[in-house]
């Protein structure tokens, strides 16, 4: 069997009791199921929520904190307890675990983004289980992923996972909220995530978690755009992850509309890079980069906005102002202005392209 790479996200509601207390038996049960597929040869990355929920009880609180400092304090207390339980549970199967706490800031710079990939890839090669959580104890709102659903989607993308499994307390995606309408129709399979489906989804979530079904659908859409298959559903104590991987899971399977895998470099440009300027291009250039898969040449640029350096990421817009995509430039803004001023006939640094097609992504 060829080794397959799986990312599994477990939400707080799947790890805790109704009162929010960490359920040791649930953690052990999930660990047993994950160990089973790892011992069968699969590479697994676990994205686990539950740190804040675990810390709430340890701090003597009755409900999840609403203040940022309260949540961060709960996360700081709960994270090591959660990891301790995971460590004990996987040790029974002779599986070593590693903890990674991430924020958006770890992905903004391309070098750090690549380092995160290299670390995870090395751990997987050594048959170690990486357990990832957002760094809730120090992250500021501007540098968060929003919730672990989106974090799991982005990780599954840059690791080129074969499947993302999002485990929750609802057995899949429904046309309406099944808690309000018990006869709501369930989707067993979806090709992509439509705007209509997103609009129908609700943001509501449990008392111990942050991500509702809308957050899961947004995460699924992101993973699908990078070529990753997604499952959203439940896993009871009698269900194995093997059944989910075999297509018999209790939930909804989502498949990408296009099977092409997005390269790691392009994922960084699309989802993590910040832009430092804007290029306005003519209709011919737009046709070339959008329809013909060509690079953007200086001759197609009609206007340059902002200041940027070689290697920066810039926005590319049509003459109407509509955003077409993002790309890493091979010239600085001053160099491009100089080239345009002399009629787009000369190269300053020996490169013909303003943005090479390998450094370009349609958004």
Image (tube, helix red, strand yellow):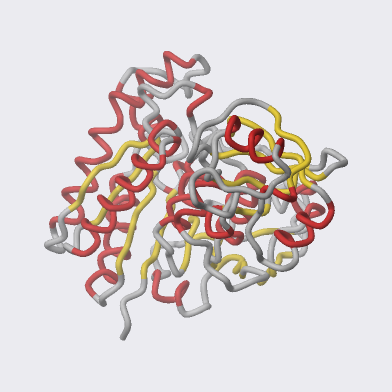
Vertical position of residue 336 compared to residue 290: above or below: above
Q: Camera-side residue: 334 or 279?
A: 334
The percent coordinates of residue 32 (x first, y second) are 27, 63
Which residue occupies 63% across, 55% down?
221
Q: Is residue 181 left or right of residue 23?
A: right
Q: How many marks?
A: 0
User: 113 or 185, which is in the foreground?
Assistant: 113
* Residue 285: % across, % down: 76, 55
- Residue drawn at x 69%, y 68% as measured from the top left: 190
Quadrant of the rendered image containing residue 40: bottom left
Observer-nearest residue: 185 or 67?
67
Residue 177 picture location, percent across and down:
73, 50
At 73% from the left and 60% from the top, the residue drawn is 290
Query: Seen from this angle, which residue lies furthest right?
Result: 320
Instruction: Name the residue rendered at 22%, 72% in the picture.
Output: 39
Q: Position of residue 255 (x, y in %)?
A: 61, 70
- Residue 176 appears left or right of 29: right
Residue 15 is left or right of residue 154, and the answer is: left
61 to 221, vertically: above or below: above
Q: For the N terminus, which image quadrant?
A: bottom left
Tell me if residue 314 comes above or below residue 65 in the rendering. below
* Relative to 337, residue 289 above or below: below
């Amino acid at each position: 069997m060829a080794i397959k790479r799986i990312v599994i996200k477990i939400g707080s509601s799947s790890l805790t009791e109704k009162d929010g207390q960490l359920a040791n038996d649930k953690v052990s049960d999930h660990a047993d199921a994950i160990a089973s597929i790892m011992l069968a040869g699969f590479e697994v990355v676990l994205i686990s929520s539950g740190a804040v929920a675990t810390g709430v009880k340890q701090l003597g609180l009755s409900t999840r904190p609403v203040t940022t400092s309260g949540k961060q304090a709960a996360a700081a207390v709960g994270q090591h307890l959660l990891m301790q339980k995971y460590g004990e549970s996987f040790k029974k199967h002779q599986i070593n675990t590693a903890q990674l706490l991430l924020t958006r800031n770890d992905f903004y710079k391309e070098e750090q983004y690549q380092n995160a990939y290299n670390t995870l890839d090395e751990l997987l090669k050594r048959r170690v289980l990486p357990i990832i959580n957002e760094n809730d104890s120090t992250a500021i709102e501007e540098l968060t992923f929003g919730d672990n659903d989106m974090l799991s989607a982005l990780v599954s993308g840059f690791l080129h996972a074969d499947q993302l499994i999002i485990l929750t307390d609802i057995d899949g995606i429904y046309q309406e909220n099944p808690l309000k309408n018990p006869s709501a129709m369930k989707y067993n399979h979806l090709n992509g995530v439509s705007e209509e489906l997103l609009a129908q989804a609700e943001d509501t979530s449990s008392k111990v978690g942050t991500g509702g079904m809308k957050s899961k659908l947004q995460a699924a859409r992101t993973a699908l755009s990078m070529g990753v298959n997604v499952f959203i559903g439940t896993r009871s104590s009698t269900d194995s992850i093997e059944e989910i991987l075999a297509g018999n899971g209790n939930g909804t399977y989502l498949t990408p509309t296009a099977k092409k895998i997005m390269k790691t470099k392009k994922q960084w440009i699309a989802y993590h890079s910040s832009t430092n300027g804007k290029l306005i291009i003519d209709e011919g250039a737009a046709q070339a980069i959008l329809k013909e898969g060509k690079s953007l040449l200086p001759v197609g640029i009609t206007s340059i906005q902002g200041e940027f350096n070689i290697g920066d990421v810039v926005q590319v817009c049509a003459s109407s102002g509509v955003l077409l995509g993002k790309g890493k430039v091979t010239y600085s803004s001053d160099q491009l202005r100089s080239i345009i001023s002399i009629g787009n006939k000369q190269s300053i640094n020996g490169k013909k392209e303003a943005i090479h097609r390998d450094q370009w992504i349609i958004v």
